[in-house]
Amino acid sequence: MLRPLALTGLSCCLIALTSCATARRHFIPREDVRAQSPRGWPAAQYTLTIASQNAGEAKVWSEGAFEDDVGGDERTVLHIGFEVENRTADELTFDVDQCRVVDVQCDEGRIANLGANEESGKLQVAAGQVGLMDFEFVLPRNTDPRDLNAFRVEWTLTTPSGAYAQSTPFRIDAARYYQPRSYYYDYNPWWGFGTGFAVGHVSSRFWYGPHWHRWCW
């Protein structure tokens, strides 16, 4: 049985500090920054207008670009998160295949587009519920997190009545930096191990209900 996300009950149990911080570049939406993610990241907030009706609300954010192990290979990974609230009587469908990171501006040029790593298909948010989604986008080899300067995220939500398509631009979050590019303040309050639960597991990165991962940076 699927249950709504209880936003007021979200918390993270911090039980240890880790020393595995790595080079990270932080990003913030360039527009409509009126909300925060459940973990406190600045998020763009959108009203989902479908067929002239208020279908709900969506928040979009990034927890930055960082180095991670991808199939035994050290690669730069870009995180994008979504929170989708469904206020309709029908399911809201998030098309993972149409979620793309495009116009990626790097020091060495542009990357046309990126698809979500190891994620595909369609994810449903039931009527009256809230869904949280986390995606990772793997950049080409030899791309350092600090090479990234800007990008856009294209995403689409659909109901039987119609679709809502959006393109969210991101820029470097300069507020998190206090020195030139080579040295910066890598701040993240969520150190350690988080624990929690999920109800109605749909995919490896889609949850109904409070959700936490083990994050290390």
Image (spheres, rainbow, N blue to C red):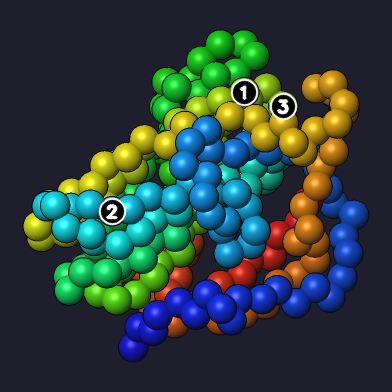
Q: Which mark is residue 189?
A: none
Residue 76 figure quarter? top right
Q: Which residue is denoted by mark 3 in the rendering?
A: 146
Report, in whole angstroms, how far the alpha carbon at label 1 lies from the one at label 3. 8 Å
Residue at image position (67%, 45%) is: 69
Amino acid carrying label 1: it is Asn
Residue 88 in the image: above or below residue 80: below
Report, in whole angstroms, how far the alpha carbon at label 2 lies from the one at label 3. 33 Å
Q: Position of residue 19 (x, y in %)?
A: 90, 54
Residue 178 figure quarter? top right
The crowding category of the residue bearing disc 2, from other C-alpha atoms within 10 Å (few below 14, some 14 to 19, many at least 20), is many
Residue 207 figure quarter? bottom left
Q: Secondary structure at mark 1?
A: strand
Q: Which mark is residue 149?
A: 1
Residue at image position (52%, 44%) is: 33
Q: How many marks?
A: 3
Residue at image position (14%, 52%) is: 52
Q: Position of residue 156 (x, y in %)?
A: 28, 46
Mark in the foreground, 1 or 3: 1
Q: Which residue is denoted by mark 2 in the rendering?
A: 48
